[in-house]
Amino acid sequence: MYEIPLSELAPERGWIKLDSPRLLPLKNEELSLGKKLALDIMLRVGKARCPNLFRTMFRNFRVFLRFAAFNATVMPNGKLSRRHTELAILRVAWKTRSYYEWSQHVEIGLRIGLTSSDIHRVTLGPEANNWTQVEAVIIQTVDELIDDKAISSETWDTLSAYLDERLKIELMFLVASYNSLASILNSVGIQLEPDVERVVMETNYIKETLINS
């Protein structure tokens, strides 16, 4: 076994990363008082490290504020465990090739207790070694919702052994929300904040066999 930087992980077709943003983040002088207040709350109270995202989406403040309020009900204020939430979001980011979403949730995942090996395992899918049964079926659920636009009967039955109806609905909305957000991030080309990129660049994982044979 040997250590490899997380920064070397990439989906089969590579990350979607525009060289420059199609929409620029608002500068301080372009922010109204209400936008400044909202930005302060989101960054300070929410402990988010994504000012480029907020400042860019504030170009349509009315729409984004409502989206952000909904999104907060599933992350970080959802009823799924934070571990399961972050595993699901990371899998969405990997499947959608969203470098910004992936990197942000690598940093968040490490903060809430995921290991670098957990993050590596997300890239290998539900068949990877060392998932619990509920973790594997959550990853499988993400894959089916993105690839097939529906959860199979087999996966639904397995998921139902671990999550009640409320949590199943929450998981589906979580995947849908971050799938939609990834599409926007990929299209707009929001640039990753240097302090978050530094975490990705400086974190290593242990290379090992993680797929069941």
Image (cartoon, rainbow, N blue to C red):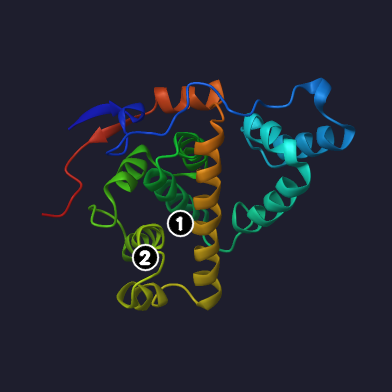
The quadrant where residue 54 appears:
top right
Residue 147, given in percent of the width and then of the height, sits at 35, 58
Q: Residue at x 55, y 62 (%)?
A: 173
Q: Is residue 182 left or right of residue 209?
A: right
Residue 53, given in percent of the width and then of the height, sits at 63, 34
The quadrant where residue 203 appears:
top left
Q: Residue at x 60, y 60 (%)?
A: 78
Residue 123, given in percent of the width and then of the height, sits at 31, 44
Q: Is residue 209 left or right of residue 27?
A: left
Q: Residue at x 47, y 50 (%)?
A: 89
**Residue that label 2 marks:** 134
Query: Dividing the image into 4 quarters, which one contains the C terminus?
Result: bottom left
Of helix, strand and loop, which one carries label 2? helix
Q: Identify the mark nearer the N-term, 2 or 1.
A: 1
The quadrant where residue 153 appears:
bottom left
**Residue that label 1 marks:** 84
Of helix, strand and loop, which one carries label 1? helix
- CA gap between label 2 and label 1 equals 9 Å
In this rendering, is residue 29 above or below 101? Answer: above
Q: Residues within 10 Å of mark 1 (few under 14, many from 20)?
A: some
Residue 120, given in percent of the width and then of the height, sits at 31, 41
Amino acid identity at mark 1: His
Q: Nearer the viewer, residue 177 or 209?
A: 177
Amino acid identity at mark 2: Val
